[in-house]
């Protein structure tokens, strides 16, 4: 059974940090590029970061560059998003997803999604 499960979300003050985790089961993570996306209320889902299957390529949405870092641990079949210097505008449900195409910030290129984890940045 294919499954992606996100964890690590929560409530954090502006300037704080969170580390999101995405565990995969039912398939080998190293066969896929992986991405993190987010969706805030009333907004479309947007790509935050992605990493190629080889980890050679990473991409970041402009507003998170220098603050977020994606990495993967294929031995653990997991991908992570370290988020530092969080801002209120980072508040959203964060999703991980897999792509058999390429590391992209375009949601349409991802074929399987987790259920999401809520991140709220507020004082």
Image (tube, helix red, strand yellow):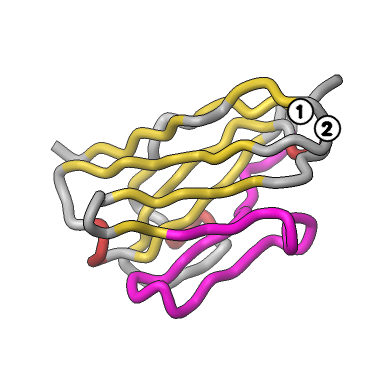
Residue drawn at 44 percent across, 62 percent down: 109
Query: Residue 54 appears in which quarter of the rendering?
Result: bottom left
Q: Nearer the viewer, residue 38 or 74?
A: 74
Q: Position of residue 41 (x, y in %)?
A: 72, 27
Indicate yes or no whether the magenta region holds residue 54: yes
Q: Which residue is mark 1?
A: 121
Q: Which mark is residue 15?
A: none
Q: Name which of mark 2 and mark 1 comes first in the sequence.
A: 2
**Disc 2: which residue:** 14
Q: Nearer the viewer, residue 96 or 41?
A: 96
Q: In front: mark 2 or mark 1?
A: 2
* Magenta region, residue range: 43-71
- In this picture, is 122 found above or below 100? above
Choose between 49 and 19: the one closer to the eye. Answer: 19
Q: Are marks 2 and 1 in contact (CB under 8 Å)?
A: yes
Residue 19, picture quadrant:
top right
Image x and y of residue 44, in percent: 67, 42
């Amino acid at each position: 059974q294919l499954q992606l499960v996100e964890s690590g979300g929560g409530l954090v003050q502006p300037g704080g940090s969170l580390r999101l985790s995405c565990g995969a089961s039912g398939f080998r993570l190293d066969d896929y590029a992986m991405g993190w996306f987010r969706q805030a209320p009333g907004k479309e889902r947007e790509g935050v970061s992605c990493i190629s299957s080889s980890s050679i390529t990473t991409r970041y949405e402009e507003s998170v560059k220098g603050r977020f870092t994606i990495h993967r641990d294929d031995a653990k079949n997991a991908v992570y998003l370290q988020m530092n210097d969080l801002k209120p505008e980072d508040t959203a449900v964060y999703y991980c997803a897999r792509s058999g195409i390429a590391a992209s910030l375009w949601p349409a290129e991802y074929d399987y999604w987790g259920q999401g984890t809520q991140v709220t940045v507020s004082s």
